[in-house]
Image (cartoon, coloured by chain):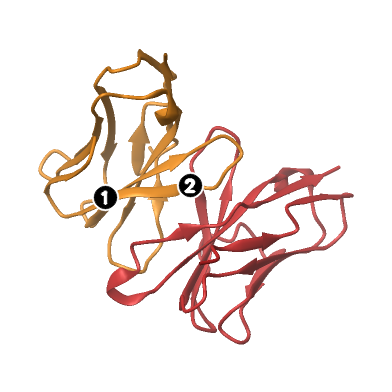
Chain colours: A red, B orange
Amino acid sequence: GAGVSQSPRYKVTKRGQDVALRCDPISGHVSLYWYRQALGQGPEFLTYFNYEAQQDKSGLPNDRFSAERPEGSISTLTIQRTEQRDSAMYRCASSLGGLAGYEQYFGPGTRLTVT
Amino acid sequence: QKEVEQDPGPLSVPEGAIVSLNCTYSNSAFQYFMWYRQYSRKGPELLMYTYSSGNKEDGRFTAQVDKSSKYISLFIRDSQPSDSATYLCAMIPTSGSRLTFGEGTQLTVNP
């Protein structure tokens, strides 16, 4: 079946612009996670949802970052007033949740470049 | 100090070698221990997971967890060039919560 999909795959934006990154989880997966991965590093947690409820947003770097999952399926990560330090690979993952929540499946990522 | 420490390598071995990859951690609350494989320009792919201490074997791969030492390992037997990738350890205190990753070890298996 289809895996986690993310769009766009690449995004180049100018400093100060807002960007919206989209994640479409595996069908039936109730939990959705956002991570950010710098080159040569492991993914770093940003936030996650169970259904439409945001369970943990402690990894969001500052209030320019926000995420939503209004219908418990597709999620959007929004970065306002982008800065060059926001340039990174943004990865989404999903899981069945509950006792199977350790098994997180990752999407291909969105490469964000802020110029 | 990072919660999860992993030697970034790079590690280069000949085909057929046994590979040992390791991570240490500091948070005793971690209960689930995962190994992900990440090919260049791809997302991480879950290889194996272990709950609490013990060993788990899947084909050429064996995962070991020693909670008393806060040390986990992944062994790859009869390594193949197709095993060349970055291997990331990841940990989670309870099912469904956030993964904490090591920085990954870059492995190259030479034919």
Q: Nearer the viewer, mark 2 or mark 1?
A: 2
In the figure, A34 relative to B61: above or below?
below
Q: Secondary structure at mark 1?
A: loop
Q: Which mark is residue B27?
A: 1
> In this picture, is A13 found above or below A5?
above
Q: Is residue A83 left or right of residue A32?
A: right
- The residue identified by callout 2 is B44
> Camera-side residue: A56 or B86?
B86
Q: Residue furthest bottom?
A: A71
Q: Would residue B38 be found to the left or right of residue A81 on screen?
A: left
Q: Quadrant of residue B74?
A: top left
N-terminal label among 2 and 1: 1
Residue B41 placed where, x, y %? Answer: 61, 39
Mark 1 Cα within 10 Å, few/some/many (few <14, many 20+)? Answer: some
Q: How many marks?
A: 2
Q: Is residue B106 visible?
A: no
